Amino acid sequence: MIKVQNLKKSFGDNEVLKDINLSIEPQEVVVVIGPSGSGKSTLLRCINLLESITGGHILIEDKDITDKKNDINKMREEVGMVFQHFNLFPHKTVIENLMLAPTKVRKVSSVEARKKGMELLQKVGLEEKANAYPSSLSGGQKQRVAIARALAMEPKIMLFDEPTSALDPEVVGEVLEVMKQLAKEGMTMVVVTHEMGFAREVGDRVIFMDGGYIVEENEPKQLFESPQHERTQAFLSKIL
Amino acid sequence: MDFRFDIIVEYAPFLLKGTLLTIGLSIAGILIGTVFGLFIGLGKMLQNKLLAFPFTVYITFFRGTPLFVQILLVHFGVVPFLIGETNAIYAAIIALSLNSAAYIAEIFRAGIESIDKGQMEAARSLGMNHVQAMWHVILPQAFKRMIPPLGNEFIVLIKESSLAAVITAPEIMYWGRAMAGQYYKVWEPYLAAAVIYLILTISLSFLLNRLERRLKTE
């Protein structure tokens, strides 16, 4: 579903991703962990082309999204993204947040977009907040709306960039619950997170990144219980 | 000092006509200036430095030279060059618009750049193109932040339109000066003019405050 080949990314002289090779299968849930500055968020942002890449290729369903001939906007419609800081549109109500992209990009009628939006809000347990503005929601509610907003475009892949890092501890669970549900329904997901419990329970595969490389990848159980690489051991011993 | 209200009453119809022209000049200036300013502000924000350069020069020139000089240049230079003869009202509108466009361009740029870049990323990640994201997500939020500085610019414009008196555009100060010239009086004409400008600017800030409150979503 996603193939990353020899991906390189530099910010000026600073090479953040050095040589990333990665393949993600349909319906797979891949959790990316690693110390800060290891390049995990950048990797995710590259998959959505929010960062221009310096070298290598990214293929989504065999289409090379780094090829200038392909329409980036069309590609992005297939890939949903959830941000650490939610990035809801503050001037629009919750339901309008969900309706904006489908009506403007997909040209869905607003009646249909509203219906679909309400279904998604129900799914994340926030249908009663449809007409509220984002500023009146708690962090956990905001992130659930952000997930619903991404789902409104019916993406084939969902990327989560530290979705619970900006949340108060007591609301982390409600967001993870929505993500678990999504995984259970067979969504292909790439999740950058520090929630090791989630990685263990939901992840099909865990990738440990450090210094711009993928150091180690394995099934969660193996990776957490018997990490092969020294740097993985050092990282895990610090956080577990 | 005997204050002669009678000459103010005598000049009232002229001052009223002058007030209408002042309002007209200011509205024309802010409307044309806003359209121009958006265009120039977006131009200055272009990634390509070479393409952005003319817009930077424009802003530098119109912010860096006195409006008085610009009015004279437009009145005695630009308008005659364009239509063969000069016209004080056209000249005033053109000079005020060009001048306010430079300031409004910077207001737009600051407003747009003040929006968190996560907003653009979220919009793009949903498949919107740059123009859609600007139009539906960035500009509505930026506009709300631009109301106070835009209102400020509008108030400045109302006051600076008084400079059009020197090119004989018959606005408030033109009639004020005429009254001063006819009666050799100082306080009556200029205080009358000052009061009218105050009424205009206070009403405008009242309207802007209400607009700002109505657009608040938080």
Image (cartoon, coloured by chain):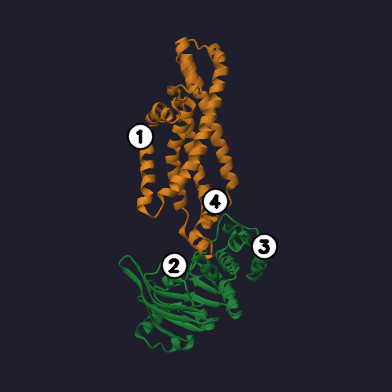
Chain colours: A green, B orange
Which three-letter amino acid code belongs to the residue tagged 1? Thr
Return the residue at label 1: B65
Under mark 4, the amino acid is Pro
**Residue type highlighted by circle 2:** Lys
x 35%, y 52%: residue: B49
Residue under disc 3 on the same chain as residue under disc 2: yes
x%, y% of residue A5?
41, 78
Q: Nearer the viewer, residue A215 or B47?
A: B47
How far apart are labels 3 and 2 at the CA level? 34 Å
Counting other residues with Cα less than 10 Å from the Cα at mark 4, is it few (<14), some (14-19), or many (20 or more)? some
- Mark 2 vs mark 4, CA separation in Å: 30 Å
Circles 3 and 2 in contact, beta carbons < 8 Å: no
Q: Which residue is mark 4?
A: B140
Residue that appears at 41% across and 52% down: B46
Q: Answer whether labels 1 and 3 touch (C-beta < 8 Å).
A: no
Quadrant where the C terminus of chain A sits is bottom left
| Label number found at residue A68 | 2
Foreground tag (2 vs 1): 2
C-alpha gap between disc 1 and disc 3: 53 Å
Q: CA distance from mark 4 to mark 3?
A: 21 Å
